[in-house]
C-alpha cells in the first residue's frame, strides 16, 4: 500500500495539471484508467485502483482489460468528467488523500482519490463546496453517498522517517510502482491458477485411472475365452449323449476326466453346443476391444499426466489460463444441457433426473438415432446414448447406461432392474400425459444387475465434469 510520501513522489512526476480527460476505461468495480492528453506530454494513461490490497495509482503504458459492463460510477465519470481540464492537483499534507480540480464549460468539479486502508479507501466526485455528486463505493453509514458532505482531512507534518519511500530503481517511481504492483498481482493470479489447475488435474486423472481400473477388470474377466471353446469341443465330442431337455451333461473331457456342463434345457443339443461357440467368439471380441480400449486409455493417461506436469512446472500465467480455459469451455456448454453428462467408450450419455429434465432432453437435446433407455415398472430418469455416425452401441455402453438408469430411479435400492431401450424416433408422446411421459415402440429389453465398480467409475466423472 502506498504511503503519503510515496503518493507525493508519484504526483511530482505526473503531468496532471493542464491535462485533459479524454476517456474513462473501467476494468472492474475497484479500478479504472483515465486517458489523458497534455500539450507537452501528449497522450498518456493514469491507472487508479482502490479498495484492494494492491490499491495504488500511477502512470502506465498498458491499458488493462476493459470491463464488459460499466458500473454506475464509471458512467457518471464518462458523462461529467470527459472533456475536463485538470486545473490543480493537491495532496492533503502528510495524508493519502489527493484532490484534482476539474474545469469543464465553466463548471468546477473535484475528483478525490483516497488511498486509506480498509473501507476508508474510495473515489469521490464533489462540487466545489464538497457535496458528493457520486462515489465509487457508496457507504451511507459513513455518510459517503450521493448528497453527503465530504469532509477534507486535516493535514499533518510530512514524516519521511516513519513513512519512507521504498527502495526503487528505474526511469521513474511511477514506472517502478506500475511494474511492482503488476508483478505482485501476477504472482497472486499465478498462484490461484496453479491451485485451480492442480485440482482440475487431480480430478481428470482420477477419472482416467478409474476407467483404466474398470477396463483392466474387464480384460481379466474376458481373457479366459478358450475355456468356452474347450467346453464346446467337449460337448461336440459327446454330442451322441446329449438330448433336448437336459439341464446338465455328465461327459468326459479329452483327458478322460468326467465333467459336468450346465445346459439350457429349452435348446437342442446342437443349439447348446453352438451357444458355447457363440459365447467364445463374443468373449474374444469383448477381450480384444477391452485390450484396445485399455491401450488407448493408458496412452491418454500418460499424455495428460505429461501435459499437466509440463504446464504446472512452467507455472506461466498465460499457459495456466489457457489450460484452464481449455477445460472450462466445454463446462460452459454443458450448463445449457439439463441433467448430467457422462462418457462411455467414446459415447456421450445424458441423464435426466426428473420429469422436467427428461422432457427438456427429449425436446431439445436428442436426435432421432439417439438411444433412449428407461427402467421398466420403476419411475426414474431417462438415459440418452448419443449416436455416433457409423458406430453401433457396444454392450459395455449399454451396461453403463443401464447402471446409470437404475442409480437414478426408484429401483436403486434393489440393485437390479429390467430396462428397455429404443431409438428416440420410436418414442411416442402420450396425449394429455404428464410432462416428459412417452411410450416406446420397437424397444429391446435388458436386465441389469448393478456393478458397483462400473457405477463408481461413472459417478467419478460426475465429480470431475459437473
Image (cartoon, rainbow, N blue to C red):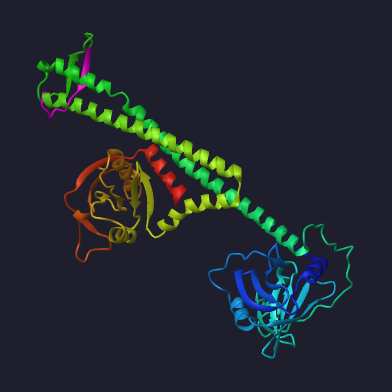
Please indicate whether residue 147 sits to the left or right of residue 246 in the image.
right
- Which residue is at a point 15% across and 15% down the rendered structure image? 237
Where's residue 272, x and y in %?
15, 25
> Quadrant of the rendered structure where residue 277 is?
top left
Q: Is residue 101 above or below residue 170?
A: below
Q: Is residue 326 above or below residue 24?
A: above
- Which residue is at a point 11% across and 24% down the rendered structure image? 270
As drawn, the residue found furthest toward the bottom would be 106
Observer-nearest of 250 and 162: 162
Where's residue 451, x and y in %?
35, 38
- Which residue is at a point 63% across and 78% down the rendered structure image? 22
Observer-nearest of 234 and 59: 59
Reply yes or no: does residue 265 show up in magenta: yes
Where's residue 89, x and y in %?
77, 78
Extent of the magenta region = 258-269
Observer-nearest of 426 and 438: 426
Q: Is residue 308 above or below residue 54?
A: above
Residue 28 visible, this angle: no
Reply yes or no: does residue 14 show up in magenta: no
Observer-nearest of 372 and 69: 69
- Which residue is at a point 85% across and 74% down the rendered structure image? 93
> Quadrant of the rendered structure where residue 207 is?
top left
Residue 132 visible, this angle: yes
Quadrant of the snapshot with the N terminus: bottom right
Where's residue 299, x and y in %?
43, 35
> Quadrant of the rendered structure where residue 450 is?
top left
Amino acid at each position: 500500500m502506498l504511503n503519503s510520501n510515496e503518493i507525493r513522489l508519484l504526483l511530482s512526476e505526473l503531468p496532471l495539471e493542464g491535462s485533459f480527460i479524454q476517456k474513462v476505461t473501467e476494468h472492474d468495480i475497484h479500478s479504472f484508467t483515465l486517458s489523458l492528453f497534455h500539450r507537452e506530454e501528449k497522450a498518456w494513461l493514469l491507472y487508479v485502483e482502490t479498495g484492494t490490497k494492491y490499491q495504488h495509482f500511477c502512470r502506465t503504458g498498458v491499458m488493462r482489460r476493459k470491463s464488459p459492463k460499466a458500473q454506475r460510477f464509471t458512467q457518471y465519470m464518462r458523462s461529467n468528467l470527459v472533456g475536463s481540464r485538470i486545473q490543480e492537483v493537491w495532496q492533503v499534507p502528510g495524508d493519502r488523500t489527493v484532490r484534482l480540480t476539474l474545469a469543464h464549460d465553466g463548471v468546477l468539479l473535484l475528483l478525490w482519490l483516497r488511498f486509506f486502508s480498509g473501507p476508508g479507501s474510495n473515489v469521490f466526485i464533489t462540487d466545489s463546496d464538497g457535496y458528493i455528486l457520486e462515489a465509487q463505493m457508496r457507504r451511507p453509514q459513513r455518510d459517503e453517498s450521493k448528497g453527503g458532505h465530504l469532509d477534507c482531512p486535516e493535514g499533518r507534518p510530512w514524516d519521511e522517517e516513519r513513512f519512507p519511500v521504498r527502495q526503487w530503481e528505474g526511469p521513474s517511481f511511477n514506472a517502478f510502482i506500475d511494474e511492482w504492483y503488476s508483478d505482485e498481482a501476477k504472482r497472486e493470479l499465478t498462484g490461484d491458477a496453479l491451485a485451480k489447475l492442480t485440482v482440475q488435474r487431480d480430478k481428470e486423472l482420477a477419472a482416467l485411472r478409474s476407467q483404466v481400473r474398470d477396463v483392466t477388470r474387464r480384460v481379466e474377466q474376458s481373457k479366459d475365452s478358450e475355456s468356452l471353446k474347450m467346453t464346446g469341443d467337449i460337448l461336440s465330442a459327446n454330442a451322441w449323449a446329449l438330448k433336448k431337455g437336459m439341464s446338465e451333461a455328465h461327459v468326459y473331457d479329452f483327458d478322460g476326466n468326467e465333467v459336468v456342463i450346465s445346459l439350457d434345457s429349452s435348446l437342442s443339443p446342437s443349439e447348446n453346443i453352438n451357444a458355447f461357440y457363440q459365447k467364445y467368439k463374443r468373449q474374444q471380441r469383448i477381450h480384444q476391444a477391452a485390450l484396445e480400449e485399455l491401450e488407448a486409455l493408458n496412452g491418454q493417461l500418460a499424455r495428460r499426466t505429461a501435459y499437466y506436469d509440463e504446464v504446472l512446472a512452467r507455472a506461466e500465467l498465460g499457459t495456466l489460463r489457457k489450460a484452464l480455459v481449455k477445460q472450462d469451455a466445454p463446462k460452459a456448454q454443458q450448463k445449457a444441457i439439463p441433467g448430467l453428462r457422462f462418457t462411455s467408450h467414446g459415447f456421450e450419455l445424458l441423464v435426466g433426473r426428473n420429469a422436467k429434465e427428461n422432457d427438456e432432453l427429449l425436446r431439445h437435446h436428442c436426435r432421432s438415432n439417439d438411444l433412449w433407455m428407461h427402467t421398466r415398472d420403476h419411475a426414474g430418469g431417462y438415459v440418452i446414448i448419443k449416436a455416433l455416425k457409423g458406430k453401433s452401441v457396444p454392450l459395455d455402453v449399454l451396461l453403463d447406461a443401464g447402471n446409470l438408469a437404475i442409480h437414478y430411479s426408484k429401483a436403486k435400492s434393489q440393485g437390479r432392474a429390467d430396462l428397455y431401450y429404443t431409438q428416440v424416433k420410436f418414442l411416442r408422446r402420450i396425449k394429455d400425459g404428464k410432462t416428459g411421459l412417452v411410450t416406446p415402440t420397437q424397444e429391446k429389453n435388458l436386465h441389469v444387475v448393478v456393478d458397483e465398480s462400473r457405477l463408481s467409475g461413472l459417478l467419478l466423472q460426475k465429480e470431475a465434469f459437473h
